Image: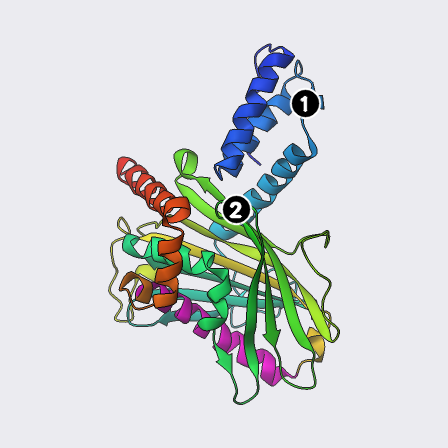
Amino acid sequence: MEATEALPKEDKGSATSLIQQADDLYADDKLLASARILRQIVSSSNSSTDVLTSQHHTILSQATDCESLIQQLIAPPKTKSSTSSSSSGEEWNKLGERHDGKHSSMIYYKIVNSTNLMTRIETPIPPSLLVPLLSVLNETELYSTWLPYYKKPFHLGVSSSTKLQQKSRVSQVIKVEVDVPWPFAKREVVIDAVALDDIEETGRIALRMVTPKSDGDIVPHPKKGVLRQEFEGGFLFLKCPSDHPSLVDKNGKRGEGEDKILVYFFMSIDDKKLHLFPQAIINFVTRIVIGKAWDMFLHVAEEIKDGKRPDHSAAIEEKKEVLYNWVDERIDAMFERMKSAE
């Protein structure tokens, strides 16, 4: 967690003023900036924390989770060597570099405690693809139109995606239903996606995704015969280091990192029945489905950029004034910060 500095002597009115700043930042999707101010208030011996509401404590909790995700993603993954017999769950299986003709990705996975499947992916992209990529993520109700669905060798894939709540400009709660091979029950994941804009401070934007801890009034209980999985993960976007291994293409040629955005993705799915799935299905998911879904994610973004996805184009046009003009503005600010840091 980031260090905080104690505030100078402040009266309660000053603390209230800082609270307003924190609220404004949070409303503008600047979660970490908001949390930094709240932490200053908490750490000040002269400030009373009774001005913090339950919402402020939620902000602090979300910020801690997001910072943990970011640190987890930017730390190089520890991979298994060919001679390793470790089963501690700390080491990743590396599927190798994946090249789709335009992008080079590094994909890893591991299974922990026989019930938890984890995946992490790293891909450098050109700056021109960032806004289309963000639109693919944001248009959650179109997920089922592009995520792979397999009918052979068995039925497996996303059957529906539903937005349950639009929490802010970009943060939302979604439900995704997944068909799995017979005789296993249909799966669903409910994801509370919290976006954060930390461009001014660190040059980063991120999306934290986690299953809500309680159903409340927003998330319905699973339908009969549907098993809900626990989901945790997210995305991180930042300037790509010039020495990132994914910048080496399939011909062994190293590209330039200065004009690339590095996309990190992490996903952890907890399924109590995972150990009952045949190894053939596990292998199919880890070695084929994950990579294909990521390829489609990038491919759809390319098609949006080229105007070949009418449903996405219509959604973007409809939300241009309330969302996508702002996205363009913030990405411009991100690129300007990248240039000034060179």
Q: Amino acid at mark 1?
A: Val
For the record, the magenta segment spans 278-302
Q: Position of residue 309 (x, y in %)?
A: 34, 67
Q: Identity of the amino acid at label 2?
A: Gln
| Distance of label 1 from label 2 (alpha carbons) | 30 Å
Q: Position of residue 316 (x, y in %)?
A: 37, 56
Residue 121 higher or lower than 202, as above or below? below
From the image, tell me which residue sits under label 1: 51
* Local secondary structure at mark 1: helix
Residue 1 seen in the figure = yes
Q: At x 42% / y 65%, what residue is drawn? A: 106
The 10 Å Cα crowd at callout 2, few under 14, some 14 to 19, many 20 or more, is: few
Mark before the other along the chain sequence, 1 or 2 = 1
Quarter location, residue 249 = bottom left
* Residue ID for mark 2: 71
* Magenta segment includes 178: no
Of the 4 image quadrants, the one containing the C terminus is top left
When the figure is inspected, residue 277 is found, relative to residue 33, above or below; the finding is: below
Question: Considering depth in this image, is 227 or 285 the residue closer to the camera?
Answer: 227
In terms of depth relative to the viewer, which is nearer, 43 or 217?
217
- Report which quarter residue 51 is drawn in: top right
Q: Residue 58: x and y, percent? A: 65, 38
The residue depicted at 45 percent of the width and 72 percent of the height is 145
